Amino acid sequence: MTTMTQTAEAARPAIRPRIAAKSGLFLFLGANVAAVTVLFVQAGVSQNVLITIGRLAGMYGALAMAFQLLLVARLPWLDRRLGMDRLTTWHRWTGFTILWTLLAHLVFITMGYAEVTDKGVVDELVEMASTLEGILRALVAFAVILIVGAASAKFARKRLAYETWHFIHLYTYAAVLLAFTHQIALGQSFAGSETAKAYWWTLWLGAGAAVLAGRVVLPLWRNLRHQLRVTAVVSESPDVVSVYMSGKHLDKMPAKAGQFFLWRFLTKDRWWQANPFSLSAAPDGRSLRLTAKALGDSSAGLRNLRVGTRVFAEGPYGAFTTIHQRRPNALLVAGGVGITPIRALLEDIDGHVVVLYRVRSQADAVLLPELNELAKARGASVSVLTGPDQAVGPRGVMLGPANLHMMVPDVHERDVFVCGPPGMTSAVLRSLRELRVPNAQVHAERFSLAA
């Protein structure tokens, strides 16, 4: 075991994958901010300050839209290192940036030209929309972005089904196209020089190609290659079911323990539903398995799937994998059905492993026999922590700093992987912060999807 651990440590890159990806992404963004600023200066500023501010805001808004496309492209290199939850968080903040920069562009440009022509702001906006090519398209694009932004607000997101929210978000691509045609028609920096044209065309085509490759070409290619079908449906408990799938060339599928897919089961009443479920067993090159709790109509309907049903799977996604393990040993913390990626990780992770499995009662501990069998074979330890939900809330003590340190005294020397309900996950992360476990050793999985 010592030799294997030393070999694994030697194989790890000197720069952590997450740091490498974040650095690369932000260097890319910084370089493009600098390029846009240079192009803006080269194009010349207007004699009217408001128009100058409006044009600069518009250029930064266009850059933010291109960057947004990169964040939602689901490129494997970024996703494996950063995770879809982190990319989705950045996607959300980038969306707010787009909204405010485009609003500033609209307001300052309109006010600036109204000042130059000595007209009212509303009259100037109406005249520009009716006489200048591309203005009306820009206004439509801005209206679409406002609608998408409203649908993304917390109060609306909680009330919308994922499929409805996703459908609304697809209109963002129409807004991007309209904004780009507006930039071609009226963008001063775009038309200012051949260098500017080459830059913007490269940026937009590159962003579009990333989305096409990550969201369309790669999923289609993988599904044509692997041709997944359901081979078995097993009830793990009254409200938990496992679905087994097989296909072709699964040894070539780049899936790792801890990752998830967006699954579509191609029946007449389910083909349009895409749901994120983790792999509940490490990929073995022959089959895949997901395990899901019946929380809604979609997941509850899994137990009615027939053997032979075709499956369209988008993924694998997620950075909740051993690629981020930095220490020789690990602590795995699971809550409820969050045990699924944890159970898969137990097959794949290096060193000595401690598993803490948080459930309300022993009867809720699904996959426990498998977990115990794996732990026995690996020399790991499994502890099932039972009790009411309040024990993991803001004042909970079961997974509080003192108890966590008592159960795992060397927690500072381990990588910690956490997956479970939001309340439990937040409580554990808070405890780890209080125990001063280095952030680089803490890994949490939250299913959060960008459209």
Image (cartoon, grey):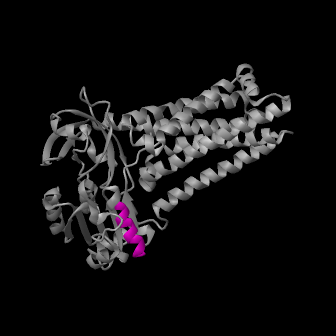
Height in image: 8 above or below 191?
Answer: below
Left or right of 265 in this view: 73: right
The percent coordinates of residue 409 (x first, y second) are 30, 80
Residue visible at 53% across and 36% down?
A: 209
> In the picture, residue 217 is in which quadrant?
top left
Residue furthest to the top in view is: 130
Question: Which quarter of the rendering shows the N terminus?
Answer: bottom left
- Asked whether residue 127 is drawn in magenta, I would say no
Mark yes or no: residue 196 visible.
yes
The percent coordinates of residue 413 (x first, y second) are 36, 76
Left or right of 187 in this view: 94: left
Which stretch appears magenta? Answer: 425-436
Task: Assign the magenta stretch its main secondary structure.
Answer: helix
The percent coordinates of residue 29 (x first, y second) are 61, 50
Question: Which quarter of the rendering shows the C terminus?
Answer: top left
Mark yes or no: residue 193 visible.
no
> Foreground: 343 or 333?
333
> In the picture, residue 41 is in which quadrant?
top right
